[in-house]
Image (cartoon, rainbow, N blue to C red):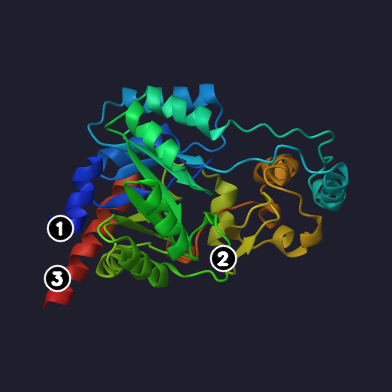
């Protein structure tokens, strides 16, 4: 293991707050993270976050049991989408328009678009109840903000549980502070997966533009920098800007413990691979590998989240099975070209970035 790093006091405070050795969080990647990956992060001394947004109640309960059976004396987080789903489904016309535009892509993989699609997502409050039943050390929200009442209820039900929020702007960070969260993830433009914007925004800020502004705005509340952080250089840069910890997702995608497919990794590692922001896959803005699908699917045909994701679900599955990198949904951040070229373990990535961080500090200190 790398030599011990002398972290800033605010980083040590964060580590004590959540019960980890290093101020690093495995980003909550729904569909990629799994109990084995989360437990591996725990063993490495970082906060392992489980993306629970698309899990059913029973499945999440099973996941958390598997994590706890690893008996790792370190914290984990459960991340849910905190958004109010539409009371009424998208109009028949909207769904039909999206389905018609999807047809040529489905035909390319030898399938038909789904008929009479129904979207079923567990309510965030039901997922929170599962996490509370397990006394999850951290419960985090994305794509929206817990209300003051929800934060209070979580802490009353489980006084040891910490609550995180996710902000993409200073205004959102200030809003989250007022709700009583214990830490804020500042998600920059570079980050992979869904943007967590929940207030009207006029611009998208990069991680290293957003973080210092959020730090200045929320005072002593811990800020976790997210987006584009791939190695020790990124970690030290984020901490220099005032972050108490960092969240890393794309760096861990190739790990043997992750649920990523070989096809998705191939798409990310293609020589011409680059990322784009798109609503085409899910109906919400998210960053992933640019493809034939993201380039050609018409914006005007996109229906609401999460119905759009339901309509594209079988296409995404078939593209993985058939190795159709031109039709894959591969969420990742702008740092994707900095991924390790092999299939490391979570422990390998952690050891590597901590070693790099230590060397950067040595160089800066002369």
For marks 3 and 1, give the CA distance: 18 Å
- Residue 162 placement: quadrant: top left
User: Which residue shows up at 75% across the image and 38% down it?
Assistant: 88
- Sequence-wise, which precedes: disc 2 or disc 1? 1
Position of residue 163 measured from the top left corner of the image (x, y, whole percent): 36, 41
Above or below for 130 versus 304:
above
For the point 67% across and 56% down, the residue is 279
How many residues crowd around disc 2 within 10 Å: few (fewer than 14), some, or many (20 or more)? few
Q: According to the image, label 3 marks what residue?
A: 362
| Residue at x 53% of width, y 69% of height | 204
Callout 3 environment at 10 Å: few (<14), some (14 to 19), or many (20+)? few
Which residue is label 2 attached to?
A: 201
Look at mark 1 in the image and give the residue it sits on.
9
Residue 118 x, y percent position in the rendering: 75, 32
Earlier residue among tags 3 and 1: 1
Q: Give the structural element (helix, strand or loop) at label 2.
A: loop
Helix, strand or loop under label 3: helix
Q: CA distance from mark 2 to mark 1?
A: 33 Å
């Amino acid at each position: 293991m790398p030599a011990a790093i002398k972290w800033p006091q605010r980083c040590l405070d964060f580590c004590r707050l959540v019960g980890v050795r290093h101020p690093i969080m495995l980003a909550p990647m729904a569909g990629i993270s799994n109990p084995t990956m989360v437990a591996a992060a725990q063993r490495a001394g970082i906060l392992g976050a489980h993306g629970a947004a698309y899990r059913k109640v029973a499945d999440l309960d099973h996941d958390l049991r598997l994590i706890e059976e690893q008996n790792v004396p370190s914290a984990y987080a459960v991340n849910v989408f905190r958004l109010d789903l539409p009371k009424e489904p998208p109009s028949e016309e909207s769904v039909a328009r999206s389905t018609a535009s999807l047809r040529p892509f489905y035909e390319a993989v030898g399938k038909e678009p789904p008929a009479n699609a129904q979207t079923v997502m567990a309510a965030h409050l039901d997922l929170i109840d599962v996490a509370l039943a397990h006394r999850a050390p951290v419960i985090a929200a994305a794509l929206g903000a817990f209300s003051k009442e929800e934060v209070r209820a979580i802490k009353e039900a489980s006084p040891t549980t910490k609550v995180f929020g996710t902000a993409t702007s200073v205004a959102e960070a200030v809003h989250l502070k007022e709700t009583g969260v214990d830490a804020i993830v500042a998600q920059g433009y570079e980050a992979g997966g869904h943007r967590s914007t929940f207030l009207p925004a006029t611009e998208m800020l990069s991680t290293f533009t957003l973080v210092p502004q959020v730090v200045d705005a929320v005072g002593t509340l811990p800020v976790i920098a997210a987006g584009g952080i791939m190695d020790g250089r990124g970690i030290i840069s984020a901490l220099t800007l005032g972050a108490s910890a960092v969240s890393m997702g794309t760096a861990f995608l190739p790990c043997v413990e992750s649920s990523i497919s070989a096809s998705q990794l191939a798409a990310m590692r293609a020589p011409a691979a680059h990322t784009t922001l798109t609503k085409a896959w899910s109906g919400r803005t998210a960053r992933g590998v640019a493809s034939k699908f993201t380039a050609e699917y018409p914006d005007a045909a996109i229906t609401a989240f999460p119905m759009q994701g339901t309509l594209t679900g079988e296409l995404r599955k078939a593209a993985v099975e058939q190795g159709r990198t031109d039709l894959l949904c591969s969420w990742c951040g702008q740092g994707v070209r900095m991924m390790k070229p092999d299939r490391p373990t979570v422990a390998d990535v952690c050891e590597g970035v901590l070693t790099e961080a230590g060397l950067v500090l040595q160089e800066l200190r002369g």
